[in-house]
Image: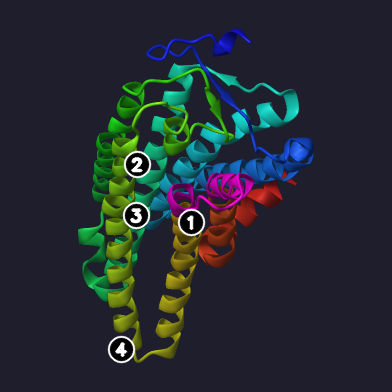
Amino acid sequence: MAVFNLTPSDPSGFILMGIPGLEAAHLWISIPFSMFYIIGLMGNFMILFVVGKEQTLHKPMYLLLCMLAVTDICMSTSAVPKALCIFWFNLKGMTVGGCLTQTFFLHTVYTMRSAVLVTMAFDRYVAICNPLRYTTILTNTCIANLGLVGLIRAVLFILPMPLLLRRLPFCANHIIAHTYCDHIAVAKTSCGDITVNRMYGLVIVFLVIGLDLALIVLSYGLIIRAVLRISSKKAHQKALNTCTVHICVMLISYTSVLLTTLIHRFGEGITPHVHIILANLYVLLPPMLNPIIYGVRIKELRDKVGKYTCRIR
């Protein structure tokens, strides 16, 4: 194939293999992929629509929920359509520019989503531990500024990734055993030394994701301590219910990405299709489950969604 007649310094494209070892089942695998993707899009767009239409929901908590919905939409849309093209039409080719752009976009969106989750934990901390000052500390403007800081942080931390990939010498084998251009998956196609890429990836995991997780654990530790001091049983239950929703969302988001990252770097003995499926779960499951969890558990949002659903019927 012409695509393999490449010079080491100037690759003309990559071949995404989908899920190696399960090529015969690609069509069947595409069914849950497409279902999860569509459900996720519908749920997140519904949240954006309802919060946008309802003035009573124009509060910090729901603005953060909209930010999370946007990151979920971007996350799944940046990876799933290409995977479905591989599964349905065997369209495996991808330009170098397209691959590096996808790498940058995927990791930037995930880092941004992590920042949103930290802000949500801080929002719940202020709401429960310092409720009298909540409206003065967390205004809509403050939330917008925190979102902008999170976006700038994500871009600054992730921008070196495609630049580090671009400097690598790529040999004749440009086959990526994946459904999308993950940073380390692309780096492994190089015939050069990828130690810097591996180290930088780990720095991002521990410095960004690790720090965010530490802040979230600290916030919820303080929240739980404050909740246990609440004498009112009703207020105690309400606070716990709110925390449970956020903790579920965070467990789903962080567990999948940490498993994927660690297996990709250290799980050499694990069958390739296992960690590729896990890598796809973190772009599929959180976007699908987040709106369901929030829609079911938060009464005010559930009532508004119900109102518009009934109107559509």
Q: Identity of the amino acid at label 4?
A: Arg
Disc 3 element? helix
Q: Which portion, as a residue range, is magenta?
A: 260-283
Give above or below for 171 relative to 245.
Answer: above
Q: Which residue is mark 1?
A: 259
Disc 4 element? loop
Between disc 1 and disc 2, the foreground one is: 2
Disc 2 crowd, CA 10 A, few/some/many (<14, 14-19, 20+): some
Q: Which residue is mark 3?
A: 60
Where residue 108 appears, as percent x and y from the top left, is: 37, 37
N-terminal-most mark, 1 or 2: 2
State how far apart marks 1 and 2 are (Cα): 16 Å
N-terminal-most mark, 3 or 1: 3
Between disc 2 and disc 4, the foreground one is: 2
How many numbered dots are placed on residues in this image?
4
Q: Which residue is mark 2?
A: 198
Between disc 3 and disc 4, the foreground one is: 4
Nearer the observer, 155 or 148 = 155
